[in-house]
Image (cartoon, helix red, strand yellow):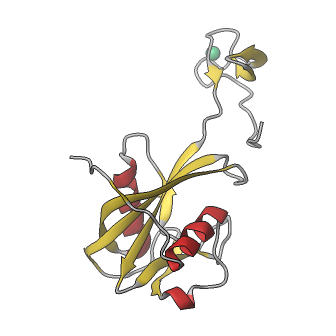
C-alpha cells in the first residue's frame, strides 16, 4: 500500500520462493522455509538547511529523480550513522562545506519517489570550514538570497521548507549531537 517498489521473489537468506501471507496486519512476502518476512520499510533521508549571510545553500541535482532541479543538500542515512552525522556528511559530499548541525527543523514523509517511500529529517547547520565545490550527486552548489531562489525546486518537502524559510517561519529545535 503506497509503495510501488517490486517485492522480493526469493528469500534473501535461503533462496526459497516467497509467498504472500497475512502477518502483522498486512499481506507481506514471507519465506515458508525460514520464516523471513519482507517488511517494506521507508528509507530514511536527511536534508540540511545551511544559511550564511542571509542566503541559503542549494545544490543542483546531477541525477534522477528531478535531475537539473535544485534542492537542499540531502541523502540517505546509512544503517550505522546518526541522522545528524549523515546530514553533515551529505552536505560535505555535495557542497565541499563542513557544517555543524545545530537544529532539527522538520520531519516529513513521502510516498511518490521511484526509489521507495521515505521519511526525511530536515536539519539546520552552520558552515565551519571547507570550500564550496559541488560533488557526488550535485553538479552545482551555491548560496541563494531569499528573493532569488531558483524556480525549479525538487521535492514537495524542500519547497515547503524553503517557503517557510523565506517567510521566516521555521521553528528550529536544538539537537543533541552524537558524541
Ligand atoms: Zn528463507
- Identify the residue at image location x=36%, y=75%: 96
The answer to whether residue 117 is above or below residue 7 is below
Q: Is residue 1 visible?
A: yes
- Identify the residue at image location x=70%, y=24%: 10
Query: How many badges with numbers are in the image?
Result: 0
Q: Is residue 154 left or right of residue 162?
A: right
The answer to whether residue 60 is above or below residue 103 is below
The answer to whether residue 156 is above or below residue 4 is below
- Which is more toward the observer, 69 or 26? 26
- Identify the residue at image location x=36%, y=46%: 82
Ligand 1 placement by image quarter: top right
x and y percentages locating residue 134 in the rendered image: 45, 78
x and y percentages locating residue 100 in the rendered image: 28, 64
x and y percentages locating residue 141 in the rendered image: 47, 81
Q: Is residue 105 left or right of residue 22?
A: left
x and y percentages locating residue 91 in the rendered image: 40, 67
- Identify the residue at image location x=44%, y=70%: 94
Residue closest to the far top:
33
- Which is more toward the observer, 107 or 134? 107
Amino acid at each position: 500500500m503506497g509503495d510501488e517498489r517490486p517485492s522480493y521473489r526469493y528469500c534473501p537468506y535461503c533462496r526459497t520462493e516467497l509467498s504472500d501471507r497475512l502477518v502483522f496486519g498486512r499481506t507481506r512476502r514471507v519465506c515458508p522455509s525460514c520464516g523471513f518476512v519482507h517488511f517494506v520499510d521507508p528509507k530514511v533521508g536527511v536534508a540540511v538547511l545551511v544559511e550564511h549571510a542571509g542566503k541559503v545553500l542549494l545544490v543542483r541535482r546531477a541525477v534522477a529523480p528531478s535531475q537539473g532541479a535544485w534542492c537542499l543538500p540531502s541523502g540517505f542515512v546509512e544503517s550505522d550513522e546518526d541522522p545528524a552525522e549523515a546530514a553533515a556528511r551529505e552536505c560535505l559530499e555535495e557542497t565541499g562545506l563542513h557544517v555543524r548541525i545545530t537544529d532539527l527543523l522538520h520531519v516529513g514523509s513521502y510516498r511518490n519517489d521511484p526509489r521507495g517511500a521515505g521519511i526525511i529529517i530536515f536539519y539546520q547547520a552552520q558552515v565551519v570550514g571547507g570550500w564550496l565545490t559541488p560533488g557526488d550527486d550535485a553538479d552545482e552548489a551555491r548560496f541563494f538570497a531569499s528573493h532569488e531562489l531558483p524556480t525549479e525546486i525538487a521535492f514537495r518537502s524542500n519547497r515547503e521548507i524553503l517557503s517557510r524559510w523565506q517567510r521566516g517561519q521555521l521553528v528550529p529545535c536544538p539537537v543533541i549531537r552524537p558524541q
